[in-house]
Amino acid sequence: MTETSVENKVSQKIISEDMQLFDIATLEDISLLKESSELECKTAGGRDGKGAIPKDMWETYSAFANTDGGTILLGVKESKGRFSIQGITNVDKVKTDLFNTANSQKVSVNLLSNQSVYEANIDGKTILVVGVRRARRDERPVFLNANPLDNSYCRAHEADQKLSSEQVKRMLAEQVEDSRDNQVLPFYGIEDIDLESLRIYRQNFANLNTNHVWNELPDHQFLNKIGGWRINRETGEQGLTVAGLLMFGTHPVIQEKFPYFMLDYQERPEAKTERRWVDRITLDGSWSGNLYDFARRVYRKLTEDIKVPFELVDGVRQEDTPVHIALREALANVIVHADYTGRASILVVKRPDMFGFRNPGLMRVPVEIALQGGEPDCRNRLLHQMFRYIKFGEQSGSGIPKILDGWQSQHWSPPLLREATEPYEQTLLELKMIDLYPSKVVENLTQQFGEKFSSLSELERSLAISINADFYLTHQQLVTQTSAHAREVTLALVKLEKLGIIKSSGHQKSKVYHSPDIEVPTPDNASGQFMADYVILNKPQEVTSDSESPDLAPDITPDMEEAQEEWIALQEIAKPVKGKIRKVGKEAVIKAILEICENRYISISDLSELLDMKVDTLRKNYLTPLVREEKLKLAYPTEKNHPKQAYSKNDRGNEK
């Protein structure tokens, strides 16, 4: 780009749904946008080269709308992470065609506006910027050609993929059902509930509402009042509601209606991702298996040894600390927002360093909106109501802010709320009991940078501390550690790097951020050579000799013996799955890979030999997804596909 073109550039704005601005004026700005959000570039030249809407653009439109939104740049070419401006000559016609098609039967809903579609000028060439917001629950799935089952897409790993029929049907159900738990089940009655669970609930209700008129009602009428029993006024059918069955039913009966229904609480002894547990509550037939009994049992486990001092208010000890409230809200949240038709289980994990919560189903509102509170869209409103009657859960929309407040009161790292689509759709909440600002790191940054550091915004300070407290962090990891928008994080990182407080290594999706005094290992630098020589396990070489005389054979050193023993041990780990990938299934292979990579780095070539799997298949189907999920970490993070790449189990990975 010439100096003149930079001086004459016209600054354009990308306006996201939350009205945050992002300048697009140069190719560098496009690179930043690529790093901070979903981006798709289309040359859009058309047959005459003057501009036309590419046919596959609408698949990307559908994918962005059904996932997290994104930006489409028409008139821009991307090749191997590099961008070039092609430009659109007849931009007015392309824009007109764009809106005409968006308002036609080509797409199920028009998400475009004059603010989200506009021209930008770079190097004297005009491009068209198309911002696609995430569709609301009542708009999804966004599909093409009036056929939702065959023409609905989602965004996965920078590609547009068709949604499965199961995913589409779930979206359609979410679209038409404000609450998923108010359906009347005409063939389910009082005999299908656990009467002891209902008795304990009623006792709890009566203790909190001493003079309530419902206390005198028989069980059948009480259930009706709280939403557990209903009459369908259109058909006359009556029975338990879905909420009544889930709240008070027994496990075998619940599973008749919801085949994938699973509840699991695990207390793990160490701050690791391993599955070993010292205490567990799951559906083993020893208790009712309903949501109410699960909630009250698990809450006691979560709070029984919390090391948070109790508060005194007017001389009275307050048993309900902010941390107790946060944990109660998190537990209620995971139960009332779950999609019980989904395949993932409800999982609650307690570790010395954190609490983890997982529920099946994606969020009904974007994560950033949920973190702010005040826009409730509860998936199971009757369940939420039942828990609120016994003071277990706040008013809809205020639960997440209560969790944030509880963790902030202890100056712990902010809660991490995120969605995942693999292997199944799920929402995850992690509450880490780690100090937000490690004192030594803050002290070092203050001494080294003085006013530069102290004058930073709260977001900039948080990012600087996180990066300098760790070896390296990716853009995605940094985004998930804050409630800020991805573009805000990107701009803050640019500023911190210009100030010299952090450095970055690598490019595009391989870029990582680290302290200025850290050299991120590559196969060609000193740090990488050290790792190759001393950390990475390579398959020991066979000891051979052309002579039959043992005197001429090379000496076998203790290090060689130790490496040989370790290789044999790894062969034993791999043996149950080696050459049996299809027979044993993907989960077994993943388990073997994580066990092989525990407490060591191992090269992809050695993994390939241990598992008897082609390198490309191993990388694509197993290693890359495990790195993305932070279950594995890379020896060379900035050169992901390098032939010398090695992998190790990541203790900081997915807690579920």
Image (tube, rainbow, N blue to C red):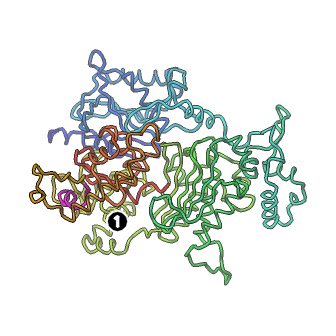
Instruction: Say few, some or many: other residues with alpha carbon within 10 Å of mark 1 (under 14 / 14 to 19 / 20 or more).
Output: many
Of the 4 image quadrants, the one containing the N terminus is top left
Residue 12 position (above or below residue 195)? above
Going 19% across and 61% down the picture, which residue do you hit? 530
Residue 510 position (above or below residue 431)? above
Question: Disc 1 designates what residue?
Answer: 465
Query: Residue 49: x and y, percent?
Result: 26, 19
Q: Which image quadrant for residue 326? A: bottom right
Secondary structure category for the residue under label 1: helix
Amino acid type at mark 1? Ile
Please tell me whether residue 534 belongs to the stretch shown in magenta: yes
- The residue at the far front in this view is 548
Going 78% across and 39% down the picture, which residue do you hit? 185
Query: Residue 337: x and y, percent?
Result: 62, 49
Q: Which image quadrant for residue 297? A: bottom right
Residue 418 position (above or below residue 329)? above
Query: Residue 469: x and y, percent?
Result: 33, 66
User: Relative to residue 144, is residue 457 drawn left or right?
Assistant: left
User: Relative to residue 364, is residue 220 drawn left or right?
Assistant: right
User: Relative to residue 189, is residue 449 drawn left or right?
Assistant: left
Q: Main secondary structure of the magenta part?
A: helix
**Residue range corresponding to the magenta coloring:** 527-537
Please tell me whether residue 463 belongs to the stretch shown in magenta: no
